[in-house]
Amino acid sequence: MQHKYVRSIFLGYVLIIFIGAILLSLPICHIKELKFIDALFTSASATCVTGLIVTSTSENFTFWGEFIILTLIQIGGIGYMSLVIIFFLFVRQKLSIDEKRAMKQSLELPTLHVGVFTKRILFFVLSIELIGAIILTYQFLDKYSFLDAIWFGIFHSISAFNNAGFSLFTDSLMSYQSDSISLFTISFLVILGGLGYFVLIEIYENRKFSKRFTIHTRIMLYGTLILIVGGMILFLSIEWNNPKTFGELNLYEKFLNAFFLSINFRTSGFNSIDIASLKESSLFFSTLFMMTGAGQGSTAGGMKITTVAILIITVIYILKESNQQPNIFKRTIEQKVINKALAIIISSSFFVLCAILLLVETQNLPFIKILFEVVSAFGTVGVSTGNGDILSFSAQFDNFGKSLIIVLMIAGRLGVFAFGLILIGKAKTRHFKYPVGRIII
């Protein structure tokens, strides 16, 4: 990981966020009064594909404001470096080695063949979002005019695939909690966006199952399935008789909304039930799903499924006192990969705990709700217990609290490993080793 590329990507995201905030502050983009900190928060939430809101997207922004938010979501989801590379490819058809390395760093690609890969990403993104928009437009026609249904369909499809969770409905998707087609469409858009671009491309290229999938893709597919099913079982067991969430729903609707909740708690910010009405045990355990997140090189945040999977496998092998190195699917996991996974998990946990401590001491608000909001921001998830109305819990924070949430969203989108490199800096190369020290643990 080269420091100059990480720094360039970080500065690029910061610049886009500030430009977005300035555009959203223009009178043509908003209806009611809009403080700059709220415009900055909205721009950061959209660019980092999080979905937390401190001002109503549908009630306080005009069509142009909504369009800017959607553009920021698309830029943040694909990655602004991807768009830069696409522009360069069309202009001069060839990339320098520095541009390839920056692109590889931005999307965490396995190789430097970024030109072909980027074109495939663009094709997949636009195709999936188009199909989602058509289905959702058809569903929204029951309640809205043709033009409104088209705009709502496009907005929610892009927001879902990019795992942003922004909605133009004041109750998110609570009014559609019985609509199987809408909820399944949104769910599968979220899942596809969360798998990661090279997983999607590998699945497409191997659609006839003529060869075995790579280790990364298999971990992502199994991990995603386990987390979705595990989340469903957990939330159904806790909320089954809660009259404010699943208690009043029929059997099918309980499973449908548990499925939707399990998916969106991990990567996206849509909700079909009132999050504030969930039991505290649900809120607490959901933070584990939000911290895990989705896949490397995807539109989602979090520590990533592969990172958590590697550490779990390593712990199992250590506890068993196995004489074998940690392995999965008959492939050994390299020690440097284990070290990186451990660093990501410890750094992420420390970063989140520090943010929670600062907010608990400065905001004078309930601990569990602050915990939930912080993890949601860092995981770029966007679900929130709310402010008692239609806004996120962050709306109750002062300017310091909102600024800290903005930092968390940027760190979550950039990745804690890259963000930590910016804060700490790169170590100097040393050409010697110290003697081994014996430590008892």
Image (cartoon, rainbow, N blue to C red):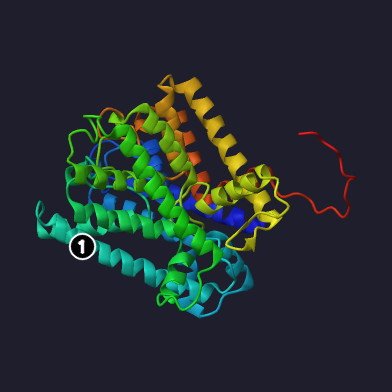
Q: Nearer the viewer, residue 238 or 168?
A: 238
Q: Secondary structure at mark 1?
A: helix
Name the spot of residue 233 as percent of width and height, x first: 35, 42
Q: Which residue is mark 1?
A: 135
Residue 150 in view, yes or no: no
- Location of the N terminus (image quadrant): bottom right
User: Is residue 288 placed above or below 360 in the rendered structure?
Assistant: below
Q: Residue at x 26, y 49 (%)?
A: 28
What amino acid is labelled 1 in the image? Ile
Q: Nearer the viewer, residue 100 or 17?
A: 100
**Residue 102: quadrant of the picture:** bottom right
User: Is residue 70 placed above or below 110 in the rendered structure?
Assistant: above
Name the spot of residue 103 as percent of width and height, x first: 55, 65
Name the spot of residue 211 as percent of width and height, x first: 50, 76
Labels in figure, total? 1
Q: Nearer the viewer, residue 398 or 264?
A: 264
Name the spot of residue 353 as percent of width and height, x first: 55, 31
Looking at the image, residue 434 sits to the left or right of residue 393; the answer is right
Residue 321 in view, yes or no: yes
Looking at the image, residue 22 sits to the left or right of residue 248; the answer is right
Q: Nearer the viewer, residue 134 or 99?
A: 134
Looking at the image, residue 54 sits to the left or right of residue 12; the answer is left
Q: Residue at x 40, y 75 (%)?
A: 207
User: Is residue 276 placed above or below 2 in the rendered structure?
Assistant: above
- Location of the C terminus (image quadrant): top right
- Neighbours of disc 1 within 10 Å: few (<14), some (14-19), many (20+): some
